[in-house]
Image: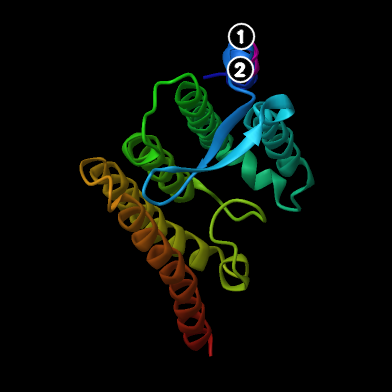
């Protein structure tokens, strides 16, 4: 997909968020649910005002940030090599946030869908694709496992991201499976993801130390 088309889709997702929110705004209660606890029950509220536009504004801010990062990265040439995967991740992330916005709007319009039943699949897709992105990412300062050890060695970077990308894809699948266990979904999602993140950092260190020993 050409870069221009990807950017048009990214912009279109943000526009959809603002348009849909604006259309339903008059029907929303003045005090609307905006946060849910681990059990999927609403436990936080906001005054309608600008609060209902918080996620669309966040989406807009993130798009600007994601577009700026490759320009200021000291290794920005490397990002060019996996830019299609980077842009696709942005699209999936924005669709994920748009889906959350839709859930919030529907809840406050009377169609109360528990986040614990709604989030596992979109979150799983997002984490799965994060794994795909990591397996294609080349050394840079903003995407991937950016430890001192991965940034000091191309080989450590490649090996770390090959394994970590696979782990994140498994985490994505586990999150999707959590759809069948809404009461346990948060644990099924967080525990493997945290374990994979800790493993990635430790693994990069072990690989780097091994490389130093090979050089000596």
Residue bearing mark 1: 23
In the rendered structure, the answer to whether residue 124 lies left or right of residue 146 reads left
Place residue 149 in its image quadrant: bottom right
Of 88 and 94, which appears nearest the observer? 94
Task: Write the residue at 34% across / 46% down.
Answer: 172
Q: Nearer the viewer, residue 41 or 22?
A: 41
Secondary structure beneath label 1: helix
Q: Give residue 191's quadrant in the image.
A: bottom left
Q: CA distance from mark 1 to mark 2?
A: 5 Å
Contact between labelled residues 2 and 1, with CB atoms less than 8 Å apart: yes
Q: Which residue is mark 2?
A: 21
Q: Which residue: 31% across, 47% down?
A: 175
Q: Nearer the viewer, residue 158 or 92?
A: 92
Residue 101, position in %: x, y?
Answer: 53, 28
Q: Residue furthest front?
A: 30
- By secondary structure, the bulk of the magenta-drawn segment is best described as helix
Residue 18, compared with residue 66, is above or below; it is above
**Secondary element type, mark 2:** helix
Residue at image coords 73%, 27%? 50
Image coordinates for residue 40, horizontal then vertical, percent: 38, 43
Residue 20 seen from this side:
no
Q: Which residue is situated farthest in the left direction here?
A: 180
Residue 176, compared with residue 163, is above or below; it is: above
19 in magenta? yes
Give the residue furthest to the top: 23
Count of labels in the image: 2
Q: In the rendered image, is residue 77 in sight?
A: yes
Q: Which residues are magenta?
A: 17-23
Is-magenta flag for residue 28?
no
Determine whether, in the image, residue 207 is placed left or right of residue 118: right
């Amino acid at each position: 997909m050409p870069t221009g088309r990807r950017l048009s889709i990214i912009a279109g997702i943000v526009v959809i968020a603002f348009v849909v929110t604006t259309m339903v705004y008059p029907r929303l209660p003045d005090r609307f649910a905006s946060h849910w606890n681990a059990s999927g029950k609403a436990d936080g509220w906001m005054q309608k005002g600008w609060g209902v536009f918080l996620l669309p504004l966040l989406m807009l801010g993130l798009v600007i940030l994601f577009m700026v990062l490759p320009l200021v990265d000291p290794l920005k040439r490397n990002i060019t090599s996996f830019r299609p995967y980077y842009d696709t991740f942005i699209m999936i992330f924005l669709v994920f946030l748009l889906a959350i916005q839709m859930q919030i709007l529907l809840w406050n319009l009377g169609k109360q869908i528990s986040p614990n039943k709604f989030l596992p699949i979109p979150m799983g897709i997002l984490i799965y694709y994060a794994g795909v992105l990591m397996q294609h990412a080349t050394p840079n300062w903003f995407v991937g496992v950016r430890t001192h050890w991965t940034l000091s060695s191309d080989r450590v970077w490649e090996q770390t991201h090959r394994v970590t990308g696979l782990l994140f894809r498994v985490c994505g699948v586990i999150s999707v499976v959590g759809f069948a266990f809404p009461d346990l979904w948060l644990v099924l999602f967080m525990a493997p993801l945290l374990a994979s993140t800790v493993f990635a950092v430790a693994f990069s260190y072990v690989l780097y130390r091994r490389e130093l020993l090979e050089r000596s």
